[in-house]
Image (cartoon, rainbow, N blue to C red):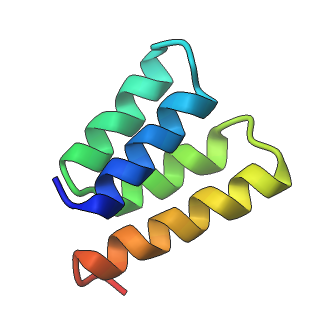
């Protein structure tokens, strides 16, 4: 796993501490390199503006690493 994927997964696990179906869907989307699904699910997550900004930065780096942006 590349560092961007690890950072994204760690952040999501810290923010969504309980292994809920939503967290599991997010983790699966990351592991299957489905950035559109990750962004869709993140938009639905109960994150603060600061958290949302941070996760979007992580997503941008992850997508850049995988040649999507």
Residue 20 in the figure: left or right of residue 54: left
In the image, taking residue 45 as reference, residue 3 lies left or right, namely left
Instruction: State the image coordinates of residue 20 (x, y, percent, origin top left).
Output: 49, 14
Tell me where residue 34 appears, x and y as whole percent. 28, 56
In the picture, measured across the screen, residue 13 lies left or right of residue 33, that is right
Outermost residue on the right side: it is: 49
Snapshot quadrant of residue 36: bottom left
Q: Residue at x 46, y 27 (%)?
A: 23
Name the side, left or right, on which 60 lies relative to 50.
left
Residue at coordinates 44% horizontally, 39% vertically from top-left?
10
Is 19 rendered above or below residue 16? above
Residue 49 vs 26, above or below: the answer is: below
Residue 30: x and y, percent?
30, 48
Residue in the image at 32% along x and 49% along y: 6
The C terminus, quarter of image: bottom left
Q: In the picture shown, does residue 46 fall above or below 65?
A: above
Relative vertical location of residue 59 with respect to residue 33 in this rendering, above or below? below
């Amino acid at each position: 796993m590349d560092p961007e994927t690890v950072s994204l997964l760690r952040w999501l696990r810290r923010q969504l501490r309980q292994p809920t179906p939503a967290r599991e869907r997010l983790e699966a989307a990351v592991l299957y390199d489905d950035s559109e699904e990750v962004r869709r699910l993140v938009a639905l997550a109960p994150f603060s503006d600061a958290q949302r900004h941070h996760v979007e930065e992580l997503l941008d780096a992850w997508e850049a690493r995988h040649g999507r942006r």
